[in-house]
Amino acid sequence: MSSTTPMMRQYLEIKSQYPDAILFFRLGDFYEMFLEDAVTASRVLDITLTCRNKGAAEEIPLCGIPFHSSQPYIARLVENGYKVAVCEQVEDPKTAKGIVRREVVRVVSPGLVLDTESLKPKENNYLVALAEGDAGRYGVAVLDITTGEFRVTETAGLDGVRSELTALNPREVMVADGAEGTSLRQGLAAILAGRMVNLLPEWTFESDRAAGLLTDFFACGSLAAFGCAGLPGAVRAAGAILHYLQETQKYDLGHIRPLATYHTRDYMVLDETSRRNLELTATLHDGGKKGSLLGVLDRTVTAMGGRRLRQWINQPLVDVGRIQGRHQAVAEMVEKSLLRDELRAALDGVYDLERLNAKIAMASANAKDLAALRSSLMRLPALIDLLQGVEAPFLLELGSGIDPLLDVCELLCGAIVDDPPFVLREGGLIRDGYHDPLDELRLISRQGKGWIARLEQQEKERTGISTLKVRFNRVFGYYIEVTRSHLGKVPDDYQRRQTLANAERYITPALKEYEEKVLGAEERLVEIEYDLFQEVRQQTSRQGRRIQQVADALATLDVVFGLSELAHERNYVVPEMDDSGDLVLVEGRHPVIEAMSLSERFVANDVTLDTRENQILIITGPNMAGKSTFMRQIALVTLMAHMGSLVPARSARIGVVDRIFTRVGASDNLARGQSTFMVEMTEAANILNHATPRSLIVLDEIGRGTSTFDGISIAWSVAEYLHDNPAVAAKTLFATHYHELTDLALTRERVKNYNVAVKEWNDQIIFLRKIVKGGASHSYGIQVARLAGLPAAVIDRAREVLRNLESGEFEREGEPRLARSRRGKSSVPVPQLSLFDSESDEIRRRLDELDTAVLTPLEALNILDQLKKMV
Ligand code: ADP
Ligand code: MG
């Protein structure tokens, strides 16, 4: 390629180190892109593509953008799935000998966006690395460079990885190059789709190297400090992240928090499907927050609180004590509504301390950012004061953790002006009285300016030119302008500089003398201010850990106050939590649907689930009756209780649930574009393989993706399995429009039937939304079809066929046919069913063969005798 000029040689050499990124090559006030990068960037950014050496043999495509407004361009490229390597001039061009030294100082990729303008305030922007551990385990390391959060965990199997990825929703995922990465990418193909996947060299994942990198970076003796000493997958993944970070960010990374290991066993397990189905943080139909559980629960007033709430929803607790601690705190703030209002008011207006802190650490914060930090810190004393009035231990602990950061606040108050500008290179940042030499210079500059301002008046008087003006531009500096009609009165000491159409511009020696004073002082002012600003920023940065700790406490407080506000407004109650297997809700409501403005009032419903008598509830009822709503409501209420929220019910008693499974029937889940029966069965298999007696299972129309008979059969056997197998005997809600399944309750003691009440009126159905005991008598499909406007003839014929089908549902003996099994043992002995065996078939055959029309009374008696013997 062209290497004709030294600069081009430098470009190509740097570009060769970042082949997969678009190189932003700093040339003066521009970032230039060359060759293929230029072609790509001009297309994505919609900017003009030009050429170097136009017409010559080696034409070089080229495009550029101004350096001071590069952020939106970088953001756009990254959004479109590109990486951008930002290459700066790292020495002063004025003093450089030969070509200016240039280096890539930062690589921006989707997981490493620093420009918070292009990020959602209440969402983390995660970068994730995945690595294999021992015995089928996987390490998942996660970093948010904009907040400094750095965590790692290990999961058993790829399902666990999927669950974490769904919760974290990273934009960029890194795996090792080679076989390990290939198998991870294949196994996780569906969930990695749409995310940038980075292949890092295998050696970056190497265990010893990773361990060394981590202990070096955080300057600690061993991995034990992070709690991941025995977790090789976790260490490898975390090491790879740190490596990538150091490779791509040539800034201070002091804001990255010490690696924290978390354990999935400390949280309720929610598989990928259940997270989606329950619409925890995003709806199925458009992926938005509105309409999700988060959408309803989020009353936080700070970005930090918003992100923390998301985390609480994604990681519900399973420790009764910790859950109760949160409930107690929320409940107290529900009670103390006045204090809550004051506390929320104090928090409102606190800026995103985590992201501000990261910007400060990486030296990208401007004076406005420091002012935002200052105004946030100024709210702390009042907050601390208000928190004196709380009693819940959870709140007390949070309150005591808030450092008022008076020193930082004082520094910022003293140094930075009230309303500083965005730009750092034009002065106006530092407050008078902060730095004596600066104040002196300012005085000189101001006096000079005053002199110039007075000059206009003096000169008008001296020359008698009423229209004379003193002005400034960048080319001539200060000058005197005289319109054409007054040229005759211009004195001799005026030196002409420029002639315009109807005016002349002049300078005088005195004017230039003052100009030098003013401009010289201003130039120095700008420089001094910039240096002082950097000093203040660095000083603040040294207190980064303390700022992070405050941010942490505020985030959690914000979540608690928000949940209290919501509970107060919507009349939630404190759920009673225990270690039993029970789940009892009185007048429970669906948190999301009740919050939507519906034409009908939301009807509350009770439920009792336990492991003794009410393990499996079969819920029947016509389409649109409210089955799905009822079941989801129970799952959501359970989850809310575990995350620490109060719940929409009149009362609730909930034994801790280790995991919630949901399976939503094919047609209810079209949003994901996966309606295949296979998917449905895979999910069912997952449930049957992983459920425990402490789990909660929601099965909505399982088996719907196949033929009716197959569907009923599978649904039936799944329910039996959950009932009969003590290891998986989870509390189960099972909605179905196959009312045949209600017969299960005849043969299985912990199965109970419920249905959603409807009223028939004039051949119409009215939905009552009330869950009542017993199975639905029929499915009302035909009424629904009639409502939909099917012709009367079709409806009538359907009725006829239905009658035929229904009369064949039971055999003569009254046995629910579906319950029959070749292995007698799977049926519990119910007296009237145990009569039937193989002899009865023989008896039936004999009876069938008889022609009673030709039988004599004696023959009949003989046969009767034989039959009796057979019995
Ligand atoms: P199904 O699963 O039985 O077909 P859904 O649960 O989808 O029925 O409910 C259908 C609609 O009925 C829901 O969209 C909701 O608007 C309304 N609905 C359900 N349950 C209730 C209730 N308890 N109170 C008020 N409206 C309800
Ligand atoms: Mg439904």
Image (cartoon, rainbow, N blue to C red):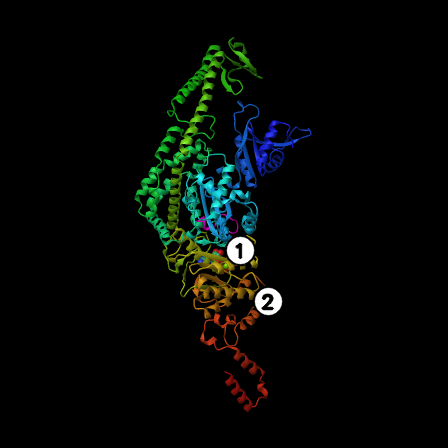
Q: Position of residue 249 (x, y in %)?
A: 50, 36
Q: Position of residue 204 (x, y in %)?
A: 52, 42
What residue sits right under mark 2 in the picture? Answer: 793
Q: Does residue 332 appear in this view?
A: yes
Q: Residue at 47% x, 29% y: name it.
A: 423
Q: Earlier in the sequence, mark 1 or mark 2?
A: 1
Amino acid under label 1?
Asn
**Secondary structure of the residue carrying numbered label 1:** helix
Residue 850, placed above or below residue 491: below
On the image, which quarter does residue 388 sit in?
A: top left
**617 displayed left or right of 388:** right
Residue span colored magenta: 284-296
**121 displayed left or right of 345:** right
Magenta-colored segment: predominant secondary structure: loop
- Closest to the camera, between mark 1 and mark 2, is 1
**Secondary structure of the residue carrying numbered label 2:** helix
In the rendered structure, find residue 669 and report the number of the disc placed on it.
1
Q: Judge: label 1 CB < 8 Å from ligand 2.
A: no
Density class for disc 2 (Cα within 10 Å; few <14, some 14-19, many ≥20) is few
Residue 292 is inside the magenta segment: yes
Q: Quadrant of the N terminus?
A: top right
In the rendered structure, find residue 518 and report the number of the disc placed on it.
none
Using the image as rendered, state which of residue 784 and residue 125 is in the foreground: 125
Residue 439, placed above or below residue 653: above
How many numbered marks, from 0 up? 2
Using the image as rendered, state which of residue 766 and residue 534 is in the foreground: 534
Residue 261 is inside the magenta segment: no
Amino acid under label 2?
Ala
Q: Does residue 279 appear in this view?
A: no
Q: Judge: label 2 CB < 8 Å from ligand 1.
A: no
